[in-house]
Amino acid sequence: MSVIVLNGTSSAGKSTLAAALRDRFAEAGECWLVMSQDDFFSKIPRAFVRYGTVHVGSFAHQGVSLAIVDGVLTRRVGPIGARLLEAYRAAIAATARSGVNVIVDEVLVDESDWQSWCRHLEGLDVHWVGVRAALEVVEARERGRTDRVNGIARAEYDQVHRYANYRTEVDTAVLDPAAAARAIFAARRSDRSRSRAPQRPSITPPPR
């Protein structure tokens, strides 16, 4: 089975795009499951999470802490947070290996995230997608949301695309979700067609 990872900043439009892509695959008769870190971290006690200054859990040092320091997004992961991140990635890999296609809504904060994904997804058909939009666009979206801390998108902006090797990139400031989903769908179909094409055998000329 396959995994498509949509990587981009907060407010880049990944969640909306993931839903549109899932629906595009459904039109073609394929079932895809959308998963994200929220599936894990929204279900742990809030005491183990810090999100800027909006919420500071008393045990966040053991879980996950996100803060903006000198304009840079800083993530501190304690022992419980590290186990949760590993469990999240392992769950997605296990879901794919059990026969279910997965679309992942992701934010790569640092190189260790990328390395962990490569380890967990090794041997699977993985298609990484860079989800981009101009900074002023994501900041405007962020200001219009009640579930985001202003400044997170800017702090993430120069970090999230440093490490992944993309097979497709889309600009959600230019393409609406349906158009971006069609572009990813077409790119994946093209990749799969090339991978299934018979390879012409190499011919070694006989020695003279």
Image: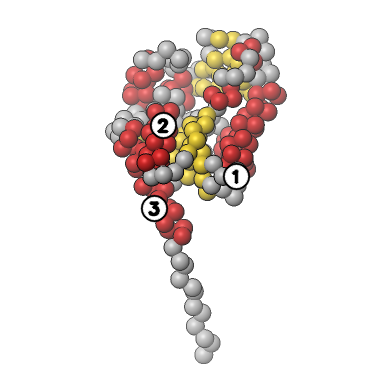
Task: Report whether 24 appears left or right of 120.
Answer: left
Q: Position of residue 165 (x, y in %)?
A: 48, 44
As drawn, is 144 to the left or to the right of 151?
Answer: left
- The structure residue drawn at horizontal position 34% and vertical position 43%, both measured from the top left corner, is 183
**Residue nearest the observer in this picture, 104 or 67:** 104
Q: Considering only order in the chain, which callout, 3 or 2, is on the residue closer to the N terminus? A: 2
Three-letter code for the amino acid on which mark 1 is drawn: Arg
Q: Amino acid at mark 2?
A: Ala
**Residue hosting label 3:** 190
Please tell me whether residue 177 is drawn above or below residue 140 in the rendered image.
below
Q: Nearer the viewer, residue 83 or 165?
A: 83
Q: Residue at x 50, y 22 (%)?
A: 72
Image point (44%, 43%), residue name = 30
Q: Disc 2 on helix, strand or loop? A: helix
Crowd around label 2: few <14 · some 14–19 · many ≥20 (10 Å): some
Mark 1 or mark 2: whose residue is earlier in sequence = 2
* Mark 3 secondary-structure assignment: helix
Q: Are marks 2 and 3 in contact (CB under 8 Å)?
A: no
Q: 9 or 121: nearer the eye?
A: 121
Chain-order first, disc 1 or disc 3? 1
**Disc marking residue 97:** 1
Tell me whether circle 1 and circle 2 mark residues in contact (CB < 8 Å): no
Instruction: For marks 1 and 3, give the CA distance.
Output: 22 Å
Q: Position of residue 75 (x, y in %)?
A: 58, 23
Counting from the top left corner in percent of width and height, residue 107 is at 50, 30
Q: Residue at x 40, y 50 (%)?
A: 189
Q: How is the image coloured?
A: secondary structure
Residue nearest the viewer, comparing 39 with 73: 39
Residue 168, visible in the rendered structure? no
For residue 19, the mark is 2
